[in-house]
Amino acid sequence: MFGTHDLALFVVSGLLLNITPGQDVAYIVSRSAAHGLRDGCVAALGIGAGCFVHVFAAALGLSAILATSATAFLVVKLVGAAYLVWIGAVMLLGRGNGRAPSDGKGGERLARVPARKVFTQGFLTNALNPKVALFFLAFLPQFVDAGSGSMAFLLLGVIFTVNGTLINLLWAWSAARLSTMFGGGGRFGVWIKRAVGALFVSFGLRLALAD
């Protein structure tokens, strides 16, 4: 269909890859646990939007530039690494506990972050990761017929991203439920946020040192 083959195998493989936790999942879980299901879902949608950047790049052949140009890869890598370290530092070292007034049920909740900011951070977390671009460049062609045009790459990329977004929304829901079991945002959300902040710093440093 549209120059693709083994579509069922592609879907299964994509779902297994999306289930595997990484920096995208870490960001979604931290937002959902600290600020509620809404923020987790917004983060998941932002990451999905960032993934489309890599889909179009693969379809247009731009990802090949990152694979063949050491300079291009270095620039994108350093920008992405710096962004991850910055986001991690903000989450890890942010002043105060981020709490807002009582939720009206005798408990405290973390202050909400504007949805636009959550979406943008999720988008950039994915879009600025050159390894995702190289992943699409390596993974998608395995399911594209020889001589097929960009439509095949776009179709597979959309399928992969939609399935990944559904998985990420499930991560957001699970994190929100777990947070509720521990009494909502409050102290639990603060420590989740700090733990993920430290994880993001490590992700950024690891990306900066990647070949």
Image (cartoon, helix red, strand yellow):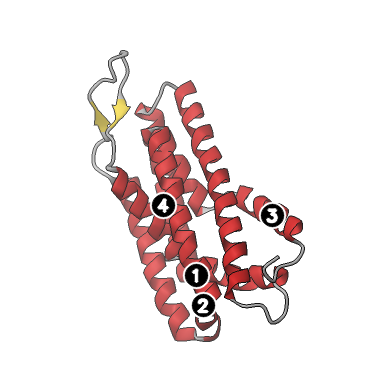
Q: Which SS class for mark 3?
A: helix
Q: Are marks 3 and 2 in contact (CB under 8 Å)?
A: no
Q: Which residue is mark 2?
A: 60
Q: Which residue is mark 4?
A: 46
Does the image show residue 192?
no
**Which is more foreground, mark 1 or mark 4?**
1
Q: Which residue is mark 3?
A: 11
**Residue at the far front in the pictured view:** 2
Residue 171 left/right relative to 1: left
Q: Are marks 3 and 4 in contact (CB under 8 Å)?
A: no
Q: Which SS class for mark 1?
A: helix
- Percent position of residue 159, x then y: 60, 56
Q: CA distance from mark 3 to mark 1?
A: 19 Å
Label located before the other in sequence (3 or 2): 3
Q: CA distance from mark 1 to mark 4?
A: 16 Å
Q: Residues within 10 Å of mark 3 (few under 14, many from 20)?
A: some
Residue 170 numbered tag: none
Label located before the other in sequence (1 or 4): 4
Task: Name the residue at 53% across, 65% down.
Answer: 132
Label located before the other in sequence (3 or 4): 3
Q: CA distance from mark 3 to mark 4?
A: 21 Å
Residue 52 left/right relative to 112: right
Residue 56 numbered tag: 1
- Percent position of residue 191, x then y: 40, 36
Q: Residues within 10 Å of mark 1 (few under 14, many from 20)?
A: some
- Percent position of residue 203, x then y: 47, 59
Label located before the other in sequence (4 or 2): 4
Kind of residue at badge 1: Phe
Q: CA distance from mark 3 to mark 2?
A: 22 Å
Q: CA distance from mark 4 to mark 2?
A: 22 Å
Kind of residue at badge 2: Leu
